[in-house]
Image (cartoon, helix red, strand yellow):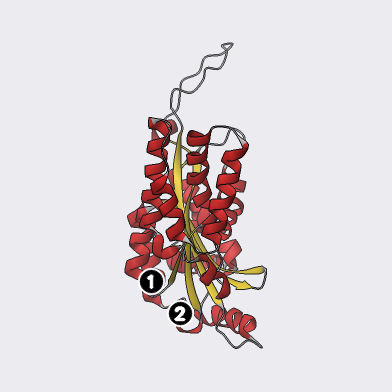
Amino acid sequence: MTNHKAEGLTVLDVAPPRNEIEQRIAAVSAGRSRRPVLVLGIDGAYVPTRPDSARKPCAGQRRKRAKRARWQGQWRDAKGFRFYLLDGERIIHVLSWHQVQNEEQLGEALKQVKEAGVIPEEQVRLCVVCDGAEWIWKHVQVLFPHARQVLDYYHCAQYLHRVAKTHYGASVQALEWVEATMTRLYLGKVGLVLGGLRRMQAQSDEAAKAIANCWDYLDAHRGRMAYRKLRRGGYPLGSGGIESSNKFICHVRLKRSGAWWYEINSNQMLALRCAKYNGTLDQVFVRYQQRLRKMSE
């Protein structure tokens, strides 16, 4: 049933219509002087897949103990994106699309959403919150050049903790340095953080490498780290919205004990789950019924 209903579904097939999205925006905008913030999050979630060669039947023998399958499973990246509105401390889901796909295919799906005019960008303050992956920002720059770009604040902590561990070791001084540095970033003092990293005298080659990597990472995204100004504008600092989407759309359904999915089956299941959370599952069934009528004519 999943295969029949989800065959050939695209992001536009599971996306809510523009007028419905406008209604959600209007509900959030009521009584406010500024346009609401619409967040775009982009990320990947690893899911278990099996090769097509696993479809081949294996000859069995009676009264023989079952043997482990010869095929090897592979963890694949289900890249996806999510649009959602901010309403105070609450988020209002708008559109999700997740598939086991490469970055070009994800970029094409985003392009379809852009060209179809599904998202009324003139009615919102569009904000893109992601980690530092270069392929993500490449598509953002092309499709949404005027959106406010935000580097995930909490992702920076991973680089800083790595510096502290290699430079100070497991000590109180390491924790104090991380907390102080994260506070400076939170206050928008990116220049001070970069200057401090530049002045650090590495205690080992490993520490020198960690410091250099951290400096390069923060410097490359300097324009996306004005966290103090972003907070005043009501923009989010973290990518928790897309992380939770990865969890309740991808992980909860596909990461089950002993489950290994053929790529086409995983994508069809993901498409239906996106339709469910986008509120468009009914229109997917209508599409399926229309296809059945055409086949019977």
User: CB atoms at circles 2 and 1 under 8 Å apart?
Assistant: yes
In the image, 274: left or right of 217?
right
Quarter of the figure with residue 24 = bottom right
Indicate the position of residue 149 as horizontal and vertical percent values: 44, 67
Pick the residue in front: 94 or 36.
36
In the image, 200: left or right of 17?
left
Please state which amino acid type lies under the numbered disc 1.
Phe
- 260 above or below 279? above
Disc number at residue 280? none
* Residue of label 1: 144
The residue positioned farthest toward the top in the image shown: 63
* Residue of label 2: 121
Q: Residue at x 66, y 88 (%)?
A: 31
Pick the residue in front: 269 or 26.
26
Indicate the position of residue 185 as horizontal and vertical percent values: 51, 58
The kind of secondary structure element at disc 2 is: helix
